[in-house]
Image: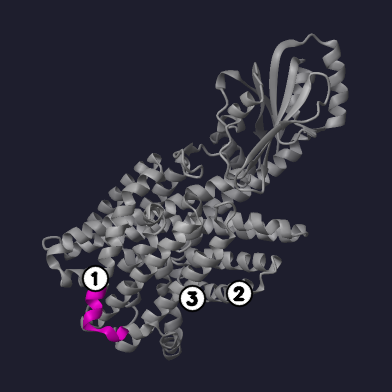
Amino acid sequence: MRSIIKSLGIVYGDIGTSPIYTLTVVFLLLEASFENVRGVLSLVFWTLITLVTVQYAWLATSLGKKGEGGTIVLRELLVPYLKSGRKVAFVSLLSFIGVSLLIGDGVITPAISILSAVEGSLLIPGFENLSQTGIVIIAGLIAVLLFIFQKNGTERMAWAFGPIMVLWFSCLALSGIGGLINEPRVLAGINPYYGFKFMMDNGVLGFLVLSEVILCATGGEALYADMGHLGRAPIVKGWMMVFVVLVINYMGQGAFLLTHPGTKNVLFEMVNHQAQFLYVPFLILSIMATVIASQAMISGMFSIVYQGINTHIMPLFKVSYTSTELRSQIYIPFVNWFLLAAVLFVMYIFQESHKLAAAYGLAVTGTMSLTGIMMTWIFFRKRQFVRMGIAVVVMLVDFVYFFSNSFKIPHGGYWSIVLASLPFCLILIYMNGQRKLYRSMRPLNQEAFLIGYNQIYKSLPKIPGTALFFAKDAKEIAPYIVHTMFKNNIIYEDNIIVSIIRTDDSFGTSCRFMDDLAAGLRVFEIRSGYMEVVDVEALLKEAGINEKTIFYGLEEITTSNIVWKIFSVIKRLTPTFLIFYKMPTNKLHGVITRVEM
């Protein structure tokens, strides 16, 4: 139960606050007739079944890797099955787009959630004339406070947020039951026939309505992205409870719409009508819940970016580890402040939550579609044909929702593309820059290096003590090592090349000395999972290494190409390899190599 409450605090804030705005936005397009309400409720119910329960709670979470989930995990699972380089490149591209869309979604989620809750204050007597500018300022201040507290870590925040979400879902269930009492006929919406009938009766309008119905499932992707924070079991169990509550509340809202056809802000007006004396406490609770909704996506962003760092598709951003219990609970300052700036910008641009809904959905359905493609491919490769067949159906549903949301692009949906393009460009520039930099550096092969090393080691006086040199692969000697030994004639009695290799596993660390390459030259290899927090200094001490100095390479990039200039700026602004691993700074000696790109 403790872990389930934590999951409510970390994972379900986003999808749990969707009732604040989903039906409100849908019925800006539709008349609140019985047929329309019943049809929309059927679409909402089966959207939650198909895209959240089946796609994420069942299929996606079954594809976790040592407790981790996310688009990059799907890529790591799929790549070993692929022999063609083109297929690997295609899958990598899909995962990069998925990561970028998820980050774009992580910007819009806090903005729409917090704005929609603050707008509920207009129903409080005396606040009817609160200006939209005032609402945006209040929402912005709430967002600033949320992002400031991120450095405390998700574990502490989960304990604060979990009980609040228990109260929030209890209120949703009670208000939904209160609405259903007056019009229980809406429960017929559970029948999928009425969803299909609504689509057939309304034609193009029905197809467009799907782009708003999908709002009920936003946050479903957090079930998979946040899996590393808690594990699969509490997330799946938590969803069983959340699903029932959401269905009850949506049905209750539908019933309230039928009995109060002029309703504009469905959830808040329903609660205000049912218990006016409790409305202000409910509004405060809803604002707290939307803050938690934002937390679900922010936690997912940290996990996704950390996976990107360790799989070498993103720069080495500074990372703080916030939990001694779960290694994957992390805080990345750059990501935190980038998201805050983007959230405030989006709030300023759109001003109102229903306008922001026009930008919402494209990133979500894009991420879901890519997840569907990769899941189907993995199940096919694993020969799990029953799951593959179900995944195909889910993927087709994803595509329908994605194409429906594509009609939003001229009306604000382009902001989803703009926001996603920033991390996507960062990934492409960084990866291609690293590849070109590696080619420009021209590492020396081990055999040629050993010929020169043996001559120098025999002929030159040696400095007492141990020197460490870090390299990706001991078989290819980095230019800075060659410069240090051959050009600067710096030779220690004991020289150790340390190689850190990221494996396909999420967690796990092993280290060992390889066979000595030559007199006074050894190789120490560290192998670790791509989500593992590696304490390199501790591993070196355990192996009996007491280094006197640590050499590492620095590149001074000269270029006239604008893309490589951006890459050069990225390299300067992000920590070096050894600072990222928190090696003792008093022992570090950087060796600069000038590189023309």
**Residue identified by numbered label 2:** 392
Front tag of 1 and 3: 1
Left or right, 505 with reference to 519: left
Name which residue lies at 25% across and 79% down.
180
Measured along the vertical axis of the image, is residue 468 above or below residue 426?
A: above
Name which residue lies at 58% across and 44% down.
309
Q: Which residue lies furthest to the front in this view?
A: 1
Q: What stretch is highlighted in magenta?
A: 177-186
Q: Which of 57 and 109 is in front in this view?
A: 57
User: In the image, which disc is placed on residue 331?
Assistant: none
Question: Callout 1, which amino acid?
Answer: Ser
User: In the image, which disc is placed on residue 404?
Assistant: 3
Measured along the vertical axis of the image, is residue 244 above or below residue 161?
A: below
Question: Callout 3, which amino acid?
Answer: Ser
- The answer to whether the residues at label 3 and label 2 have Cβ atoms under 8 Å apart is no
Q: Upstream in the sequence, badge 1 or badge 3?
A: 1
**Residue identified by numbered label 1:** 175
The answer to whether any part of residue 493 appears in the image is yes
Label 3, secondary structure: give it. helix
